[in-house]
Image (cartoon, rainbow, N blue to C red):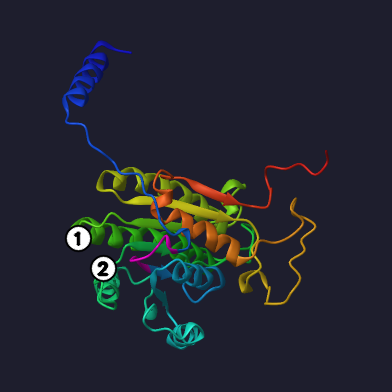
Amino acid sequence: MGFKKKVKNGIRSVIQMTKEEKLYPVPQPTNVQQVLSGKVALITGGTGGIGFVIAEAFIQAGCKVIICGTNEDKLDSCVEKINREEVLLGLVLNVLDVDSMPAKIEQAAAMFHEKRIDILVNSAGVVAHSSCLNMTEKEYDTIMDINAKGTFFMSQAMSRYMIEKGIKGHILNVTSSSALRPAWTAYQMSKWAVRGFTIGLADVLLPYGIIVNAIAPGPVATGMLGKQEGDSIASPMQPSGRYAVPSEIASMATFLVSDMGNLVVGDTVYMTGGSGVIDLKH
């Protein structure tokens, strides 16, 4: 270590020792079933399999939720399924329309009497159907724009909103175990990007009391993978022998955006059923 760096570290240590000690209360929820009581969440991709089930789990945990999507009919249908407008509302929002995001967040914040947003879940995403050898530019752009660019700018707009309002909130990115695999499709590239962005955004926002994490499922039994309710979830290729179900992902998401998860910072929680960890040959 160079002399200048030693001096700088020494000065920093002296400053830290002379600072007034802060007391940080450890969250002690009185009802674990209501860990999100009093919170308001905004979920992009909220009409999709994982996004909508996360919304349901948040509501069960005491949260009010605004689900977002581009199809108003789908939004209305999802809201009707819950049929409780006091806790679930829909908002038309396109994650590719960057200029509209600040106004949409303000609109969402005004939808419940709390007049704020405490939680952002970036769940909007699309999957690739082509390999790197036959992918078109249009497919590449669509995947990267929705999965990576949309997550980036939605998080940017929400971060600015939370900082301005003094909200010590949570941002959760729904990514994928594909972020651990060789990136031979735009989908995998986009999930690598979100994994890195999660770490970077957590670094930027922690001083403001805003917690950023990601959740990375393996194969989940949703429409994106051609699975419908009632279909078999068996998957011999998985070490666990099956697909994940959306409710499992939603349970972890609920923990990560609650105050019980405040010391999980900048991490990606993988829910892969052992894929990439367990070797079935032993």
Q: In front: 29, or 58? A: 29
Q: Which mark is residue 43?
A: none
Q: Residue at x 33, y 66 (%)?
A: 38
**27 horizontally vs 60: left or right:** left
Residue 36 among those drawn in magenta: yes
Tell me the amino acid under the disc marked 1: Lys
Residue beneath the point at 41% across and 43% down: 263
Residue depicted at 40% across the width and 62% down the height: 36
Q: Splitting the image into 4 quarters, where does residue 232 fall?
A: bottom right
In the rendered image, the residue lying farthest to the right is 281
Q: x and y percent of residue 224 in the render?
A: 61, 71
Name the secondary structure under disc 2. Answer: loop
Dot 1: few (<14), some (14–19), or many (≥20) neighbours within 10 Å?
few
Placement of 183 over or under 95, stated as above or below: above
Question: In the figure, residue 63 lies in which quadrant?
Answer: bottom left
Using the rendered view, name the quadrant where residue 133 is placed: bottom right
- Residue 52: x and y, percent? 51, 73
Secondary structure category for the residue under label 1: helix
Residue farthest to the front? Answer: 30
Q: CA distance from mark 1 to mark 2?
A: 8 Å
* Quarter that holds the N terminus: top left
Residue hosting label 2: 116
> Whole-percent x and y of residue 100?
28, 73
- Give the amino acid at mark 2: Arg
Residue 182 appears in the figure: yes
Magenta span covers which residues? Answer: 34-41
What residue would you read off at disc 1?
Answer: 165
Name the magenta segment's main secondary structure. Answer: loop
- Does 79 appear above or below 62? below
Residue 174 seen from this side: no
Q: Is residue 79 left or right of residue 14?
A: right
